Image (cartoon, rainbow, N blue to C red):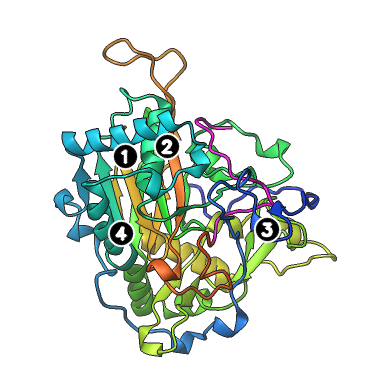
Amino acid sequence: MSPSILSSPSTQPGGVSKPTGPVVDQPTGILDRSVFPDGLRTSGQHSPIPALIHPYESFPKEITGPTVWKPEDYQTHPDRWTHPFSPEEIAELGQAADHFIASQAPLTAIAKELFPLPTLGPFFHKLKREIIDGRGFILFKGIPVNEWSNLKCAVAYLGLGTYFGYFLSQNAKGHILGHVQNLGEDQSKSAHPIRIYRTNKRQFFHTDSSDIVGLLCMAKAESGGESDIASTHHIFNTLQREHPDVVETFTKNNWYFDRKGEWSEGEEPYYKMPVFMLENEEDPLKRRVYARYDPMGVTTLARYNQGPEAIIPPLSAEQKHAIEVFEETAGRLALHMVLNPGDIQLLANSHVFHARTAYTDWPQGAVDEQGRPRKQRQLMRLWLATPEDEGGWKLPFADSKEKKRGGVQRDDTPPHCPLGAE
């Protein structure tokens, strides 16, 4: 039997981290470029502006347009959502990566201007609009991960990412290049819930704290670890028909999300928001339905809602029902795909949910058909921000107009770009 989404280990609350102090050039207030090379800082996770939270009655009964798609639209038509890189395109990416590496600039300084792609650049620009305002996803194929070094793969991937958004810190360590890998971490030895991407456990349908999330497959597991994605707006329409009570529950501003120990001085160890929100548009007819949801960030908060000193309310019966119904509905409406080494999946968190099956890594000492050692499953991850002035959605958050909106920022932790999991 599959694990219940409402089953989560209990954990002990931890202390608030101490501030490191602002890292700025005095007295201008500009970020110190020796610490933040691109002069930008991840804004972090926040609750929405209360005045921009709308009641259920303001939401559409049905959404139409290109963001609404069904798995059958794509399952047997991979040509509609995959792009195999041609030899010429791989050569262009490789040449740009080699040039950047030769410059000896820090990986955290990479930007579109430092990664010229004469042919792929215009294609990526057009595709960016399809991801942000259209179906919301693409699968690239063909990065030669077994031929290029980890450094070259990382630089090519980061360089590609600059054409879709700005890199965000993904954790308290400031990682702008994440590594989705089973590190064998033990929840019983952690003061806070462990981030699920550092395990081999199932990931339920969720969104990340970024506009776009990217995954580059470096190595597959022996079994499992497969990807499922679903149109947020197709899920919304289906729930409106079958379970309007669930949609209403998801529009209420009573959902608390766990920061899992990754917060800054002065912040609570959790934040609060609805799951379904509306865009910050003056014209009600132009307000798209936006979603932000991580069930593992909801169900790990029991340490804050138990006993006489509970500081947040426990999940209600209506919320527990909504969580279960949502997961079943998303699974029923999902497009299933397998990421092979060299594949890059990009998707928009605003209107695409994603999940992952549990997986089993290769046993120690396993070799492939050519006698080469098997690698453990590893994906490189990017969180990218696309702000309003560059075509991003008008989000109901105070940082919506910032370049690096969203992500996870702990005090003034500088950006870091590790080439392996740490």
Residue visible at 60% across and 78% down in the picture? 49
Q: Amino acid at mark 4?
A: Lys
Q: Amino acid at mark 1?
A: Leu
What element does badge 4 sit on? helix
Q: Quadrant of the N terminus?
A: top left
Q: Residue at x 72, y 56 (%)?
A: 264
Question: Which numbered disc flags the more N-terminal residue, 3 or 1?
Answer: 3
Select label 3 or label 1 by which is in front: 1
Identify the magenta region. 406-422
Q: Which residue is mark 3?
A: 301
Above or below for 33 versus 223: below
Residue 29 placement: quadrant: bottom right
Nearest the viewer among 302 and 128 is: 128
- Secondary structure at numbered mark 1: loop
State the quadrant of the C terminus.
top right
C-alpha separation, residue under disc 2 versus residue under disc 4: 22 Å
- For the residues bearing labels 2 and 4, Cβ distance under 8 angstroms: no
Q: Position of residue 54 (x, y in %)?
A: 52, 84
First in sequence: mark 2 vs mark 1:
1
Question: Which of marks 1 and 4 precedes in the sequence?
Answer: 4
Q: Residues within 10 Å of mark 2 (few under 14, many from 20)?
A: many
Crowd band around label 4 with a 10 angstrom C-alpha radius: few (<14), some (14–19), many (20+): many
**Could you classify mark 3 by the number of other residues whose Cα lies within 10 Å: few (under 14), some (14-19), or many (20 or more)?**
many
Picture residue at 17% right of the left edge, 54% below the top: 80
